[in-house]
Image (cartoon, coloured by chain):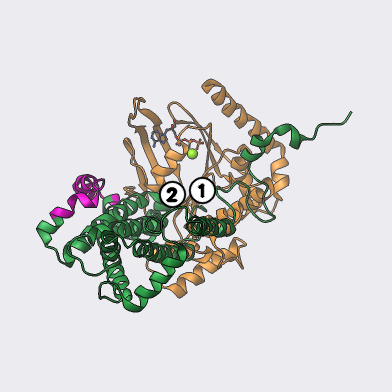
Chain colours: A green, B orange
Amino acid sequence: MTQPSPQKAEGLFARLARAKPTKPGEIYGVPGQGNTLWLSACSIALFFFVWWLVTFMGWVKPLFVPSPAAILAKFVTVWNDGFTGTPFLEHVWISTLRVFGAFILACVIGLPLGLAMGMSPVMRGLFDPPIEFYRPIPPLAYLPLMIIWFGIGETSKVLLIFLSVFAPVVLGARSGVKSAAIEQIHAAYSFGATRWQVMRHVIMPSAMPEILTAMRIGIGFGWTTLVAAEMVASTKGLGYMVLSASQFLQTPVVIMGIFVIAIIAFGFDLFMRFVERRLVPWKGRM
Amino acid sequence: MGLHIEDVSVVYPAADRRPPVEALSRINLTIEDEEFVVALGASGCGKSTLLNLIAGFLSPTSGRLVLDGRQVAGPGADRAVVFQKHALLPWLNVLDNVAFGLQIQGIGKVERDQIANKFLGMLGLDGFQQSPVYKLSGGMQQRVGIARALTCDPRVLLMDEPLGALDALTREKAQELILNIWNDTHKSVFFITHSVEEALFMGTKLVVMSPRPGRITHLFDLPFSRQFLGGTPARQVKASPEFIKLREDVLKIIFADEEAAA
Ligand SMILES: Nc1ncnc2c1ncn2[C@@H]1O[C@H](COP(=O)(O)OP(=O)(O)OP(=O)(O)O)[C@@H](O)[C@H]1O
Ligand SMILES: [Mg+2]
């Protein structure tokens, strides 16, 4: 009699559910371990292939889904001739300025405020209600208020984006304060550290991973709010470009605008991931 | 002079519908200068609580602690702590971790690196100055923690199961290392362990504690560390009839406590 091989006996699901054997020198069981570059490339390629196929075979009208080639052609035209009289790069520049301006402002104010809220019950008590109150409200809902209060100029646009970035940044910094182990804090105190030194040398560095994550989430919200911010009385910007193109049923411009926003946002996210690897290589390691 | 713990009780307040916990009840203990006091006892008998009191991380519910004539009112650089775990700073390399206390005290970079290097050499960590601490083995991390505590030249060294995570061989080496450092630097030491053999070998005074409420039930004066420092090999000290006899006696006390708890 032959022994049944254990592989067979286990069944497919058991094998899928089990952790994979590691490569030499790798740690067993780290969640999500493994390189995803190839799979990502495949997923992107598949996306474009399906898109191309659908338009090439004429399954949907170009008005609904223009072909990739049409988008590219449109991009070249807009790049050369601009959109509604404004050069393409100026649209990009204006929007980038609004989003990053609001983002930097939100970080400069939000990170210290979040740290302070984590450190001090007084600050937490004071600022928790307003932030938690406005955080779940969609920016479109208070856009009219912004316009009534701050006019249709740059202020209300940047402020709207600022508000959407601000809440996640504050909350991230606030919960980051809790990252330090009490032993690390005690160690500092037992060397005679002041409260400020503990903050500076233990709590802030250990909050870095959460702060960086919060910044990544925050800038994502910023780009999400861009179109809303450029809805009223804009003549420039990527959000404006997408919105006005959609009013004239210029679908290629809409899709192109979406791609440009996505590429800029993704590029910045890659940069933030790079910063994360350089700044906090110890994240989750101790 | 020395550290005097006078009639100290600690009650952790009630929380989440659990009753208050009397972690320590009327503790009296003196740690003289240059004494090596080891605390031993069943889990939950209040050893860490006692260490946190001495370190100043916790205030007593009643009673007082006096160090060198002054009442303990919070943590301070005269008492350094070696934690069981999680106390190194992963964003700093080994050298900067060891120099961390000196940095807090405002010592310049050059001087503090020099002092840190001295203690790294003493603990056999030469060549690891630039390594990230999270890439060290558990035993090396523990030695970094000990080096860091020593750099600021504290009066009292407080260690909460510092060797608990080490394998038998590394552990015995670390015991001898700590004894030699203690002998060279003349510090007072308060040392917590779960190992009876370690307690007997290292201490000059053994404190046996019992839980519910946490209290000191036995005190022993120990000769063994002095025998080792006097030149007798460690294995020979640990194999002597007096050592074995005392080890069995202490084990009996602790087993009785554990059984009463079960
Ligand atoms: N922060 C706390 N809040 C409430 N109860 C606590 C707290 N810390 C400790 N205790 C309780 O106090 C008692 C003593 O705890 P302690 O940590 O001092 O014991 P220990 O002797 O160090 O134990 P071990 O050997 O397991 O480390 C235990 O019953 C524990 O549950
Ligand atoms: Mg303990």
| Front residue (pair A272, B217) | A272
Q: Are marks 1 and 2 in contact (CB under 8 Å)?
A: yes
Residue A132 forms part of the magenta stretch = yes
Determine the main secondary structure of the stretch shown in magenta.
Answer: helix
Residue type, mark 2 in image = Glu
Instruction: Look at the image and tell me whether residue A75 can be seen.
Output: yes
Regarding residue A192, the answer to whether it shows in the image is no
In three-dimensional space, the C-alpha distance between marks 1 and 2, rounded to whole angstroms, equals 8 Å
**Chain ID at mark 2:** A
Are marks 1 and 2 in one subunit?
A: no
What type is the residue that disc 1 sits on?
Answer: Lys
Magenta segment includes B167 = no
- Label 2 CA crowd tier, 10 Å (few <14, some 14–19, many 20+): some
A169 lies above or below B107: above
Q: Based on the displayed image, in which of its 4 quarters is residue A81 positioned?
A: bottom left
Q: Which residue is mark 1?
A: B85
Q: Nearer the viewer, residue A10 or A245?
A: A245
**Residue at left 60%, top 31%?**
B250
Residue located 67% across and 33% down the image: B245
Image disc number at residue A21: none
Q: Which residues are magenta?
A: A118-145
Q: Nearer the viewer, residue B120 or A22?
A: A22
Label annotation for residue A183 = 2
Question: From the viewer's perspective, is A63 left or right of B132?
Answer: left
- Picture coordinates of residue B180, whole percent (x, y): 60, 56
